[in-house]
């Protein structure tokens, strides 16, 4: 190829065209005096080549793009100097790709951009061929160029053969050709090569070429230096490896050293000397140790077996933490971390007293039930602190794989023990407190039923011999105190529920939330935000307003978030240097927390017949529940129910409707229109907040009173709330969640309650601050409700 190129360069004598079609070059410019294959892709390129062959005798100009247009190369900004080439051969590689062999003829410079329907057309000035004998200065530069080339040959042999072949055909008498050949071989950036192309003066061109060669030499030398360092490092590492292997073998032969495998086995044997394995575990470990001794250390089976043995020996066999047998200390710990909840603390202390007296927890599984944010998890931690036991918590909410509880079988890749064994391994004691969170939200799938797996864990009769699938040996869990948490009991499987002692945690009222904020939340947030009491203060009225207008839920999480938001804004204000001390008052509260979430008390401001206020219990705590009844079709009859009511609540509504209708018909002293109200009116009974599903029997008297109020056209007292199940004969049956419902009533400003007579004992057990300010009527029959409810 080099020989052909030189021959062509010497023999071309054709007249050079003054107008030529231009094709942009993307990567680098092409130099004169060489023949080179170029691949063109795209219709515009192929069309330009076709026109050049047909109309311009195969001549065309190749110009490097200064500012490339990626979408359309022919719209790129081009340099003014390019190379005139002659097309010698074309080959179609694909329908839109052509390989073209071109010969560089000479440099040209753009004179004018001409209009053309065939592509880019320029009128150009051709740089004349250098015909003079080279001057001494040029010869000197060329000598320096050749010296640099020889140096490059030494460090970059890839270019050596090709350059030698090209240069064998060119003498020093043709410096222009020689420079172009060398330039075309450089690995320099396109814009630097363009400078060489644009330089028409041979002396200046030779200077620039020499500079670029020096730079190329430095880069080649640096690459060689880096390569040598890497090779030396690899050689050194290999040498070190072979020497270490030889040393290890020599030491083994002399009996003065052990290999890594022996070291692993010795560590396991040392651990075995300090633990009390069960008989079954000893047999398994001995068998696996013998197996490990026969397996090559590079085998995957070696690492699987070693991990299995380590999982067994790292368990706290026979290791127990000493219980703190001090009930007064336990009371102090619970009081320090939790305000209120006196009945809950009493139940827990009774439970702990039994543990302290008997010295074991067999059969003791607590389940703390309450709305979010009331402190279930923190109570579990406090029990651990009070008993001086280590604490581990994990959640089963959404868990669908029983292997999470009982471990994976060792046949699976990546198998590991279940959560219980992992907890024991981490805590290094056999009698910790393990809290199983969100037990009411446990799931199941084709991978097993985690709830069923928990039965073995929580059953005192079975957990003495708990079998983890991964370990495949029995471990005694009877000394572990299990504490579970849930928001509601309805979704906990019955067999699981039977194994647990239930402790209800109701929500907090305003007074309790204020004390929790003052004693715990505000100090915590001050510390978390780097503030002191001298820098920020919150007035009592502001705190009350935060609770009533921004955090009216059963727990204290929303209150904590509101305080955190206030502290962030206070920190920002002080950091700006605007104030040294910030006081939060009821007036400026919206500046820190925005618009209130609860604008008014959740009570109807206008009294009207057919509207009553009931009390309900949800997984989030107690709640108020309005019942509305209206007549929708005179001269018709029947009952329409709306509000996403469950089956039980629908039945309660039908019972209330039937009872009130029967009650009115049997009452002889009532006016005729009141007695016959349901015979001539179709009733629509609705429970607001229709997007929220509702169910349960405790709204029976509330719905019956709404229907009676509508029929009698008498409104119910404004600040009265009630709860109770109603039978078809008017008997009021007891309900659950008295404390939660009382809290909900106080939260919205209710001062008068109607409760079933049989719940009087439950109400009287409540704390005084909950009972204060409430007038409570205990009723046996619906007639008792009518005596106190209507205005």
Image: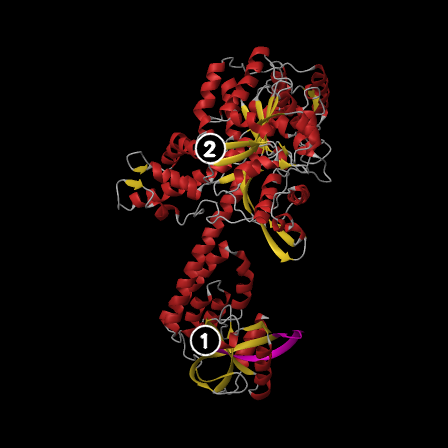
The residue nearer to you, when weighing 235 against 323, is 323
Q: Would you say residue 128 sits in the magenta stretch? A: no
Q: Tell me the quarter of the picture where residue 303 sits.
A: top right
Check residue 774 in the rendering and tell me which mark sits there, or answer none: 2
**Closest to the observer: 214 or 624?**
624
> Where residue 100 sits in the image (x, y, percent)?
60, 75
- Residue 525 position, x and y percent, is 39, 36
213, above or below 481, in the image: below
Residue 299 in sight:
no
Q: Position of residue 111 (x, y in %)?
A: 41, 84
The reply to whether residue 72 is visible in this rendering is yes
Q: Earlier in the sequence, mark 1 or mark 2?
A: 1
Residue at mark 1: 78
Viewer-side residue, 512 vs 612: 612
Packing grade of label 2 (10 A; few <14, some 14-19, many >=20) is: some
Residue 104: percent from the left, percent from the top? 52, 76
Quadrant of image for the N terminus: bottom right
């Amino acid at each position: 190829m080099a020989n052909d190129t030189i021959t062509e360069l010497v023999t071309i004598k054709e007249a050079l065209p003054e107008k030529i079609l231009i094709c942009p070059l993307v990567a680098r410019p092409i130099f004169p005096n060489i023949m080179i294959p170029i691949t063109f892709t795209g219709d515009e390129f192929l069309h330009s080549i076709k026109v050049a062959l047909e109309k311009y005798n195969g001549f065309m100009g190749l110009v490097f793009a200064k500012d490339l247009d990626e979408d359309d190369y022919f719209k790129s900004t081009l340099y003014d100097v390019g190379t005139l080439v002659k097309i010698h051969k074309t080959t179609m590689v694909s329908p839109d790709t052509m390989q073209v062999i071109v010969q560089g003829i000479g440099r040209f410079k753009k004179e004018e951009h001409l209009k053309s329907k065939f592509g880019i057309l320029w009128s150009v000035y051709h740089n004349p061929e250098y015909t003079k004998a080279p001057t001494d200065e040029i010869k000197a530069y060329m000598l320096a160029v050749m010296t640099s080339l020889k140096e490059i040959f030494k460090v970059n042999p890839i270019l050596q053969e090709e350059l030698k072949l090209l240069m064998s055909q060119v003498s020093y008498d043709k410096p222009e050709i020689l420079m172009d050949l060398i330039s075309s071989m450089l690995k320099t950036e396109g814009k630097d090569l363009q400078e060489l192309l644009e330089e028409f003066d041979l002396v200046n061109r030779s200077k620039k070429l020499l500079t670029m060669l020096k730079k190329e030499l430095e880069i080649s030398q640096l690459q060689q230096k880096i390569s040598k360092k890497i090779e030396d490092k690899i050689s050194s590492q290999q040498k070190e490896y072979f020497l270490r292997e030889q040393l290890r073998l020599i030491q083994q032969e002399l009996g003065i050293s052990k290999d890594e495998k022996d070291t692993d086995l010795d560590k396991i044997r040392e651990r075995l000397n300090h633990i009390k394995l069960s008989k079954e575990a000893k047999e398994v470990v001995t068998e696996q140790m013998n197996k490990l001794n026969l397996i090559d250390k590079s085998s995957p089976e070696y690492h699987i077996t070693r991990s299995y043995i380590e999982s067994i020996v790292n368990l706290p066999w026979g290791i127990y933490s000493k219980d703190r047998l001090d009930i007064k200390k336990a009371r102090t710990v619970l009081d320090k971390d939790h305000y209120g909840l006196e009945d809950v603390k009493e139940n827990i202390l009774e439970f702990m007293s039994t543990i302290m007296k008997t010295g074991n927890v067999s059969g003791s599984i607590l389940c703390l039930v309450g709305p979010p944010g009331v402190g279930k998890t923190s109570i579990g931690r406090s029990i651990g602190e009070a008993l001086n036991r280590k604490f581990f918590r994990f959640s089963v909410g959404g868990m669908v794989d029983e292997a999470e509880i009982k471990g994976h079988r060792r046949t699976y890749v990546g198998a590991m023990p279940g959560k219980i064994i992992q907890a024991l391994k981490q805590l290094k004691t056999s009698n910790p407190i393990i809290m199983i969170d969100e037990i009411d939200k446990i799931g199941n799938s084709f991978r097993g039923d985690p709830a069923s797996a928990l039965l073995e864990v929580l059953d005192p009769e079975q957990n003495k011999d708990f079998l983890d699938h991964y370990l495949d040996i029995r471990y005694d869990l009877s000394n572990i105190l299990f504490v579970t948490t849930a928001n509601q009991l309805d979704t906990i499987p019955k067999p699981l529920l039977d194994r647990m002692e239930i402790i209800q945690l109701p929500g907090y009222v305003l007074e309790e939330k204020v004390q929790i904020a003052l004693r715990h939340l505000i100090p915590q947030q001050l510390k978390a935000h780097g503030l002191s009491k001298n820098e920020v203060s919150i007035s009592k009225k502001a705190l009350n307003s935060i609770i009533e207008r921004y955090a009216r839920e059963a727990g204290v999480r929303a209150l904590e978030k509101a305080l955190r938001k206030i502290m962030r804004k206070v920190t920002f204000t002080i950091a700006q240097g605007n104030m040294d001390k910030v006081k939060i008052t009821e007036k400026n509260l919206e500046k820190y927390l925005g618009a209130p979430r609860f604008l008014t008390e959740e009570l109807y401001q206008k009294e009207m017949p057919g509207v009553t206020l009931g009390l309900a219990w949800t997984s989030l705590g107690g709640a108020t529940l309005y019942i509305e009844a209206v007549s929708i079709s005179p001269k018709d009859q029947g009952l329409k129910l709306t509000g996403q009511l469950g089956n039980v609540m629908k039945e309660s509504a039908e019972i209330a409707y039937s009872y009130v209708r029967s009650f009115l018909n049997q009452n002889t002293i009532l006016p005729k229109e009141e007695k016959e109200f349901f015979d001539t009116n179709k009733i629509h009974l609705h429970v607001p907040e229709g997007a929220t599903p509702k169910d349960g029997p405790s709204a029976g008297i509330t719905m019956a009173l709404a229907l009676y109020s509508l029929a009698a056209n008498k409104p119910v007292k404004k600040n009265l709330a009630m709860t109770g199940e109603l039978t078809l004969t008017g008997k009021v049956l007891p309900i659950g969640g008295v404390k939660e419902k009382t809290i909900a009533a106080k939260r919205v400003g209710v001062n008068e309650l109607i409760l079933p007579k049989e719940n009087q004992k439950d109400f009287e057990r409540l704390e005084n601050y909950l009972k204060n300010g409430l007038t409570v009527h205990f009723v046996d029959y619906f007639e008792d409700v009518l005596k106190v409810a209507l205005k």
